[in-house]
Amino acid sequence: MPDDAGPWHAPCWLAGRNVTETPVFAREHFAQASPPAPDGSPGRGPAPPSGPSAGTAAGTRRPRILVVDDEEGITEMLSDYLKVEQYDVATAQRGSEAIDRLTEIAPDAILLDVRMPGMDGIETLRRLRARDAQVPVLMITGNDDLTIAQQALSLGAFDHILKPIDLDYLGRAVAKMLGARTPGAATGGDASDRRPAAPVSTQELLYELALTVFRVARALPPDAQASLRAVLEQTALGFIQHSGSSEKAAGRGELLRSLHVIRTVLRFAKDLGDLDDETHRRLESRIVRARTSMGLA
Protein backbone atom coordinates (compact mmCIF):
# COMPACT_ATOMS: atom_id res chain seq x y z
CA MET A 1 0.00 0.00 0.00
CA PRO A 2 1.48 3.46 -0.83
CA ASP A 3 3.03 5.36 2.10
CA ASP A 4 0.72 8.32 1.49
CA ALA A 5 -2.46 6.23 1.74
CA GLY A 6 -2.90 7.30 5.34
CA PRO A 7 -3.60 5.10 8.39
CA TRP A 8 -5.99 2.19 8.04
CA HIS A 9 -9.17 2.62 10.08
CA ALA A 10 -11.02 -0.48 11.20
CA PRO A 11 -14.67 -0.65 10.18
CA CYS A 12 -17.05 -0.52 13.13
CA TRP A 13 -17.83 -4.26 12.99
CA LEU A 14 -14.16 -4.92 13.89
CA ALA A 15 -14.40 -2.68 16.94
CA GLY A 16 -12.92 -4.32 20.00
CA ARG A 17 -10.67 -6.66 18.03
CA ASN A 18 -6.91 -6.34 17.75
CA VAL A 19 -6.52 -4.23 14.63
CA THR A 20 -2.99 -2.92 15.21
CA GLU A 21 -1.94 -4.56 11.96
CA THR A 22 -3.71 -4.87 8.63
CA PRO A 23 -6.53 -7.44 9.06
CA VAL A 24 -6.27 -10.90 7.52
CA PHE A 25 -8.76 -10.25 4.73
CA ALA A 26 -6.85 -7.10 3.69
CA ARG A 27 -3.43 -8.82 3.83
CA GLU A 28 -4.75 -11.61 1.62
CA HIS A 29 -6.30 -9.06 -0.77
CA PHE A 30 -3.07 -7.10 -1.23
CA ALA A 31 -1.01 -10.30 -1.39
CA GLN A 32 -2.93 -11.20 -4.56
CA ALA A 33 -1.56 -8.15 -6.40
CA SER A 34 0.48 -9.13 -9.44
CA PRO A 35 4.28 -8.83 -9.06
CA PRO A 36 6.24 -6.03 -10.75
CA ALA A 37 6.76 -6.41 -14.48
CA PRO A 38 10.27 -7.39 -15.75
CA ASP A 39 11.03 -3.72 -16.46
CA GLY A 40 10.43 -2.87 -12.81
CA SER A 41 7.10 -1.13 -13.33
CA PRO A 42 4.39 -1.73 -10.72
CA GLY A 43 2.02 -4.65 -10.97
CA ARG A 44 -1.58 -4.29 -12.08
CA GLY A 45 -3.20 -4.41 -8.64
CA PRO A 46 -5.22 -7.14 -6.94
CA ALA A 47 -6.08 -10.28 -8.84
CA PRO A 48 -9.71 -10.70 -9.97
CA PRO A 49 -12.01 -11.91 -7.18
CA SER A 50 -13.02 -15.55 -7.02
CA GLY A 51 -16.23 -15.08 -5.02
CA PRO A 52 -19.60 -13.67 -6.13
CA SER A 53 -17.80 -11.06 -8.24
CA ALA A 54 -15.87 -13.55 -10.36
CA GLY A 55 -18.21 -13.12 -13.32
CA THR A 56 -18.04 -9.34 -13.49
CA ALA A 57 -15.50 -9.22 -16.30
CA ALA A 58 -17.65 -11.54 -18.37
CA GLY A 59 -20.52 -9.08 -18.51
CA THR A 60 -22.27 -10.06 -15.27
CA ARG A 61 -22.10 -8.33 -11.91
CA ARG A 62 -21.76 -9.18 -8.28
CA PRO A 63 -25.00 -9.73 -6.33
CA ARG A 64 -26.27 -6.38 -5.07
CA ILE A 65 -27.62 -6.04 -1.53
CA LEU A 66 -29.72 -3.10 -0.31
CA VAL A 67 -29.30 -2.40 3.42
CA VAL A 68 -32.11 -0.36 5.01
CA ASP A 69 -31.67 0.88 8.59
CA ASP A 70 -32.02 4.30 10.19
CA GLU A 71 -28.97 3.69 12.43
CA GLU A 72 -25.84 4.78 10.58
CA GLY A 73 -23.65 2.47 12.67
CA ILE A 74 -25.70 -0.56 11.63
CA THR A 75 -25.66 0.28 7.92
CA GLU A 76 -21.89 0.89 8.12
CA MET A 77 -21.27 -2.42 9.88
CA LEU A 78 -23.41 -4.42 7.46
CA SER A 79 -21.96 -2.66 4.42
CA ASP A 80 -18.39 -3.33 5.54
CA TYR A 81 -19.14 -6.99 6.16
CA LEU A 82 -20.99 -7.55 2.89
CA LYS A 83 -18.31 -5.80 0.85
CA VAL A 84 -15.66 -8.05 2.37
CA GLU A 85 -17.88 -10.97 1.34
CA GLN A 86 -17.70 -9.65 -2.26
CA TYR A 87 -21.20 -8.21 -2.59
CA ASP A 88 -22.09 -4.82 -4.03
CA VAL A 89 -23.90 -2.80 -1.36
CA ALA A 90 -26.32 0.12 -1.44
CA THR A 91 -27.89 1.70 1.65
CA ALA A 92 -30.99 3.60 2.65
CA GLN A 93 -31.93 5.10 6.02
CA ARG A 94 -35.67 5.55 5.48
CA GLY A 95 -38.44 3.40 4.10
CA SER A 96 -39.30 5.90 1.39
CA GLU A 97 -35.66 5.98 0.31
CA ALA A 98 -35.62 2.17 0.12
CA ILE A 99 -38.63 2.19 -2.21
CA ASP A 100 -36.91 4.70 -4.50
CA ARG A 101 -33.69 2.66 -4.49
CA LEU A 102 -35.59 -0.49 -5.42
CA THR A 103 -36.35 1.05 -8.81
CA GLU A 104 -32.94 2.68 -9.20
CA ILE A 105 -30.67 -0.30 -8.51
CA ALA A 106 -32.84 -3.47 -8.72
CA PRO A 107 -31.20 -5.19 -5.73
CA ASP A 108 -30.88 -8.97 -5.58
CA ALA A 109 -31.71 -9.02 -1.85
CA ILE A 110 -32.73 -6.54 0.84
CA LEU A 111 -31.88 -6.31 4.55
CA LEU A 112 -34.67 -4.28 6.17
CA ASP A 113 -34.89 -2.99 9.73
CA VAL A 114 -38.29 -3.24 11.40
CA ARG A 115 -38.03 -0.24 13.73
CA MET A 116 -37.56 2.98 11.75
CA PRO A 117 -39.07 6.45 12.25
CA GLY A 118 -41.87 7.44 9.93
CA MET A 119 -42.52 4.49 7.64
CA ASP A 120 -41.56 1.41 9.66
CA GLY A 121 -40.14 -1.83 8.24
CA ILE A 122 -43.49 -3.62 7.98
CA GLU A 123 -45.08 -0.83 5.94
CA THR A 124 -41.91 -0.55 3.84
CA LEU A 125 -42.04 -4.29 3.19
CA ARG A 126 -45.68 -4.02 2.14
CA ARG A 127 -44.85 -1.26 -0.37
CA LEU A 128 -41.75 -3.06 -1.64
CA ARG A 129 -43.85 -6.14 -2.28
CA ALA A 130 -46.37 -4.06 -4.25
CA ARG A 131 -43.54 -3.10 -6.63
CA ASP A 132 -41.49 -6.32 -6.66
CA ALA A 133 -43.00 -9.56 -5.39
CA GLN A 134 -39.84 -11.62 -5.86
CA VAL A 135 -36.81 -9.85 -4.38
CA PRO A 136 -36.00 -11.64 -1.08
CA VAL A 137 -36.16 -9.52 2.08
CA LEU A 138 -34.50 -10.35 5.41
CA MET A 139 -36.05 -8.41 8.30
CA ILE A 140 -33.84 -7.09 11.12
CA THR A 141 -35.43 -6.64 14.53
CA GLY A 142 -34.20 -5.69 17.97
CA ASN A 143 -36.65 -7.87 19.88
CA ASP A 144 -38.29 -11.28 19.68
CA ASP A 145 -41.80 -9.98 19.02
CA LEU A 146 -43.41 -12.99 17.36
CA THR A 147 -46.37 -10.94 16.13
CA ILE A 148 -44.04 -8.77 14.05
CA ALA A 149 -42.17 -11.84 12.78
CA GLN A 150 -45.40 -13.53 11.73
CA GLN A 151 -46.65 -10.36 10.06
CA ALA A 152 -43.41 -9.95 8.11
CA LEU A 153 -43.44 -13.58 6.97
CA SER A 154 -47.07 -13.31 5.93
CA LEU A 155 -46.13 -10.30 3.78
CA GLY A 156 -43.48 -12.35 2.01
CA ALA A 157 -40.30 -11.73 4.01
CA PHE A 158 -37.71 -14.47 3.53
CA ASP A 159 -36.82 -14.62 7.23
CA HIS A 160 -35.87 -12.35 10.11
CA ILE A 161 -32.70 -11.90 12.16
CA LEU A 162 -32.30 -10.41 15.61
CA LYS A 163 -29.99 -7.69 16.92
CA PRO A 164 -27.22 -7.89 17.98
CA ILE A 165 -26.52 -9.35 14.54
CA ASP A 166 -24.49 -12.53 14.27
CA LEU A 167 -22.48 -11.90 11.08
CA ASP A 168 -21.84 -15.59 10.40
CA TYR A 169 -25.57 -16.27 10.58
CA LEU A 170 -26.24 -13.23 8.41
CA GLY A 171 -23.78 -14.46 5.79
CA ARG A 172 -25.53 -17.84 5.58
CA ALA A 173 -28.94 -16.16 5.38
CA VAL A 174 -27.85 -13.88 2.52
CA ALA A 175 -26.33 -16.81 0.63
CA LYS A 176 -29.55 -18.79 1.11
CA MET A 177 -31.68 -15.86 -0.10
CA LEU A 178 -29.61 -15.50 -3.25
CA GLY A 179 -29.56 -19.27 -3.76
CA ALA A 180 -33.36 -19.34 -3.67
CA ARG A 181 -33.50 -17.05 -6.68
CA THR A 182 -33.91 -18.40 -10.20
CA PRO A 183 -30.47 -19.18 -11.76
CA GLY A 184 -29.12 -16.04 -13.38
CA ALA A 185 -31.37 -13.68 -11.40
CA ALA A 186 -28.37 -12.15 -9.61
CA THR A 187 -26.33 -11.46 -12.73
CA GLY A 188 -28.07 -8.39 -14.01
CA GLY A 189 -31.32 -7.26 -15.56
CA ASP A 190 -34.04 -5.21 -14.04
CA ALA A 191 -36.84 -6.21 -11.72
CA SER A 192 -39.17 -7.00 -14.62
CA ASP A 193 -36.87 -9.84 -15.73
CA ARG A 194 -37.20 -11.73 -12.47
CA ARG A 195 -39.04 -15.02 -12.21
CA PRO A 196 -40.61 -16.39 -9.01
CA ALA A 197 -38.30 -18.52 -6.88
CA ALA A 198 -39.58 -21.91 -5.84
CA PRO A 199 -41.24 -21.58 -2.43
CA VAL A 200 -39.72 -23.42 0.51
CA SER A 201 -42.00 -26.31 1.42
CA THR A 202 -43.24 -27.15 4.90
CA GLN A 203 -41.25 -30.40 4.73
CA GLU A 204 -38.03 -28.48 4.04
CA LEU A 205 -38.69 -26.01 6.84
CA LEU A 206 -39.40 -28.82 9.30
CA TYR A 207 -36.28 -30.70 8.25
CA GLU A 208 -34.13 -27.59 8.79
CA LEU A 209 -35.78 -27.04 12.17
CA ALA A 210 -35.12 -30.66 13.17
CA LEU A 211 -31.44 -30.38 12.22
CA THR A 212 -31.13 -27.22 14.29
CA VAL A 213 -32.86 -28.86 17.26
CA PHE A 214 -30.47 -31.84 17.07
CA ARG A 215 -27.42 -29.55 16.98
CA VAL A 216 -28.68 -27.49 19.91
CA ALA A 217 -29.59 -30.61 21.93
CA ARG A 218 -26.10 -32.06 21.46
CA ALA A 219 -24.48 -28.78 22.52
CA LEU A 220 -26.40 -28.52 25.81
CA PRO A 221 -24.49 -28.82 29.11
CA PRO A 222 -24.18 -32.45 30.39
CA ASP A 223 -26.88 -32.06 33.07
CA ALA A 224 -29.31 -30.57 30.55
CA GLN A 225 -28.54 -33.28 28.01
CA ALA A 226 -29.44 -35.94 30.53
CA SER A 227 -32.94 -34.53 30.99
CA LEU A 228 -33.72 -32.73 27.72
CA ARG A 229 -31.76 -34.20 24.81
CA ALA A 230 -33.85 -37.34 24.37
CA VAL A 231 -37.19 -35.55 24.31
CA LEU A 232 -35.90 -32.87 21.93
CA GLU A 233 -34.48 -35.37 19.45
CA GLN A 234 -37.43 -37.75 19.62
CA THR A 235 -39.90 -34.91 19.12
CA ALA A 236 -37.88 -33.51 16.20
CA LEU A 237 -37.86 -36.93 14.55
CA GLY A 238 -41.60 -37.12 15.15
CA PHE A 239 -42.44 -33.99 13.20
CA ILE A 240 -40.15 -35.06 10.35
CA GLN A 241 -42.08 -38.34 10.26
CA HIS A 242 -45.41 -36.48 10.00
CA SER A 243 -44.21 -33.63 7.74
CA GLY A 244 -45.44 -35.38 4.61
CA SER A 245 -48.99 -35.48 5.94
CA SER A 246 -49.27 -31.85 7.05
CA GLU A 247 -52.33 -31.37 4.83
CA LYS A 248 -54.24 -34.18 6.57
CA ALA A 249 -56.03 -33.52 9.84
CA ALA A 250 -54.29 -36.30 11.79
CA GLY A 251 -50.81 -35.44 10.52
CA ARG A 252 -51.41 -31.75 11.09
CA GLY A 253 -52.47 -32.41 14.67
CA GLU A 254 -49.33 -34.43 15.37
CA LEU A 255 -47.16 -31.70 13.88
CA LEU A 256 -48.79 -29.04 16.02
CA ARG A 257 -48.37 -31.17 19.13
CA SER A 258 -44.70 -31.80 18.34
CA LEU A 259 -44.00 -28.12 17.67
CA HIS A 260 -45.70 -27.23 20.97
CA VAL A 261 -43.54 -29.76 22.84
CA ILE A 262 -40.36 -28.42 21.23
CA ARG A 263 -41.37 -24.86 22.08
CA THR A 264 -42.13 -25.74 25.71
CA VAL A 265 -38.90 -27.69 26.27
CA LEU A 266 -36.80 -24.97 24.69
CA ARG A 267 -38.46 -22.37 26.92
CA PHE A 268 -37.65 -24.50 29.98
CA ALA A 269 -34.03 -24.80 28.82
CA LYS A 270 -33.83 -21.03 28.36
CA ASP A 271 -35.38 -20.28 31.76
CA LEU A 272 -33.00 -22.73 33.43
CA GLY A 273 -30.02 -21.02 31.85
CA ASP A 274 -29.11 -24.00 29.67
CA LEU A 275 -29.95 -22.18 26.42
CA ASP A 276 -28.82 -18.64 25.61
CA ASP A 277 -31.31 -16.02 24.42
CA GLU A 278 -29.92 -15.75 20.89
CA THR A 279 -30.12 -19.52 20.23
CA HIS A 280 -33.65 -19.60 21.64
CA ARG A 281 -34.68 -16.73 19.35
CA ARG A 282 -33.27 -18.46 16.28
CA LEU A 283 -35.13 -21.65 17.06
CA GLU A 284 -38.31 -19.70 17.74
CA SER A 285 -37.90 -17.98 14.38
CA ARG A 286 -37.72 -21.35 12.61
CA ILE A 287 -40.79 -22.58 14.47
CA VAL A 288 -42.70 -19.45 13.41
CA ARG A 289 -41.72 -20.03 9.77
CA ALA A 290 -42.86 -23.67 9.94
CA ARG A 291 -46.20 -22.69 11.50
CA THR A 292 -46.69 -19.92 8.93
CA SER A 293 -46.07 -22.34 6.06
CA MET A 294 -48.89 -24.46 7.49
CA GLY A 295 -51.23 -21.45 7.38
CA LEU A 296 -51.16 -20.80 11.13
CA ALA A 297 -50.88 -17.35 12.67
Image (cartoon, grey):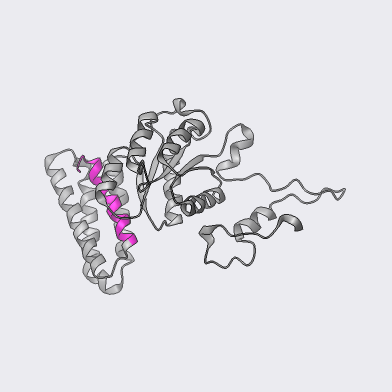
Residue 289 seen from this side: no
Q: What is the quadrant of residue 260 in the picture? A: bottom left
Q: Nearer the viewer, residue 155 or 46?
A: 155
**Relative to 220, is 92 on the left or the right?**
right
Q: What is the quadrant of residue 223 in the picture? A: bottom left
Q: Nearer the viewer, residue 148 or 279?
A: 148
Q: Is residue 214 magenta?
A: no
> Where residue 13 sits in the image (x, y, percent)?
51, 58
Total labels drawn: 0
> Where residue 42 sits in the image (x, y, percent)?
80, 49
> Where residue 100 sits in the image (x, y, percent)?
46, 33
Quarter of the picture containing the C terminus is top left
**Relative to 98, is 296 on the left or the right?**
left
Q: Is residue 129 above or below residue 140?
A: above
Q: Is residue 293 magenta?
A: yes
Q: What is the quadrant of residue 270 in the picture? A: bottom left
Residue at the top extreme? 192
Q: Is residue 7 above or below residue 161?
A: below
> Magenta part of the protein: which range?
278-297
**Relative to 265, is 141 on the left or the right?**
right
Q: Nearer the viewer, residue 120 or 234?
A: 120
Residue at the right extreme? 39
Residue at the bottom extreme? 223
Q: Residue at x 27, y 54 (%)?
A: 284
Majority SS type along the magenta span: helix
Q: Residue at x 82, y 48 (%)?
A: 37
> Where residue 63 sits in the image (x, y, percent)?
52, 39
Q: Is residue 181 above or below residue 47?
A: above
Q: Nearer the viewer, residue 60 or 114?
A: 114
Residue 280 seen from this side: yes
Quarter of the picture containing the N terminus is bottom right
Q: Residue at x 37, y 31 (%)?
A: 133
